[in-house]
Image (tube, grey):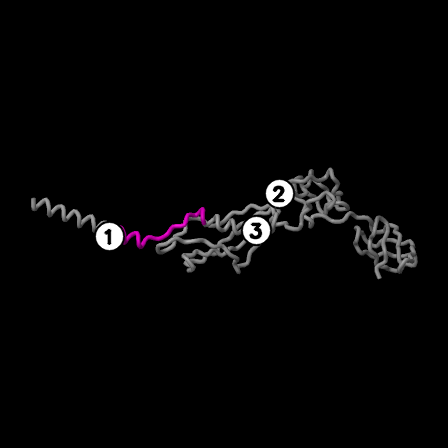
Amino acid sequence: MRSTLTNLIELVLFLGTLWVLAMVAVAHADVVVPEREVVAAVRDYALRTVEGGADVEVSCRWRGDLTVEGVGPVTLRACPSKAEGSAGGLPVSLEVRRGSKVMRNLLITAEVAYYDTVAVAARPLRHGEALTPDAVRFERREVTQMLERTFSRPEDLDGLQARTALPAGRVLDRRLTEGMTLIRRGEAVTILAGMGTVTISTSGRALSDGAAGDCIFVENGERQKIQGKVIKAGTVRVVF
């Protein structure tokens, strides 16, 4: 009987020791924030930050779970970062908080891809070819590296031509286009000059090519060199 009682006491003490050790382990356990929660916090912040109505897709470079020392729940708070960003990279400062205390402050880059329905070459285009409706089509494309340099409406292409040869499917970057040449060097032109409601005209010769709005030099009948702005095919207005 005594032996049985002794064994029982030893068992109780052993189980008690295990319980104490388990509580100590729990007390010193770290908090693990799953990767998906870190990514979601950064992604949601990025989506709120980009221009309203923009068609974007956001991904995050963070990989792996986040381990935070100590016990107690933690929260994630994404806020602006002072780090320099880029067209497709938005730096985000992610605060890991326990209550009001910031446990860690992480710099994470949100990768933002911008999309829009833009003009692309419908077929191979030659240098100088007019961007007529049959030469282009409109598709949803990523434009992250071409923000503010694409065409989203057919009327935006009026009077433009390809500045260089373009393959079919190429997004029409504004830098790859130019105004259609309305005046060729050596051509006869009409030179307009006026003040107020009075306008006079004379004949001359173009000394360079010009598109609508370009300022070019022309030569009048007295062989005087004059600068004028191209206003339509074969006509320039003197720039005073």
Q: Of the residues under marks 3 and 2, which one precedes in the sequence?
A: 3
What distance separates the C-alpha of mark 1 from that of mark 2?
61 Å
Q: Farthest residue in the bottom direction?
A: 240
Q: Are marks 3 and 2 in contact (CB under 8 Å)?
A: no
Magenta range: 22-37
Q: Which mark is residue 88?
A: 3
Where's residue 138, x and y in %?
A: 67, 40
Where's residue 17, x and y in %?
A: 21, 51
In the rendered image, the quadrant that contains the C terminus is bottom right
Numbered disc 3: secondary structure: loop
What distance separates the C-alpha of mark 3 from that of mark 2?
14 Å
Q: Farthest residue in the left direction?
A: 1
Query: Residue visible at 70% across and 40% down?
Result: 136
Where's residue 48, x and y in %?
A: 55, 51
Query: Residue visible at 87% across and 53% down?
Result: 205
Q: Nearer the viewer, mark 1 or mark 3?
A: 1
Residue type at mark 2?
Arg
Q: Check disc 3: other Cα within 10 Å, few if <14, some if 14-19, many if 20+.
A: some
Residue type at mark 3?
Gly
Q: Is residue 73 magenta?
A: no
Query: Residue visible at 54% across and 51% down?
Result: 46
Numbered disc 2: secondary structure: strand
Residue type at mark 1?
Val
The residue labelled by disc 1 is: 20
Q: Nearer the viewer, mark 1 or mark 2?
A: 1
What distance separates the C-alpha of mark 1 from that of mark 3?
52 Å
Q: Is residue 24 magenta?
A: yes
Specify whether 147 is left or right of 135: left
The residue labelled by disc 2 is: 141
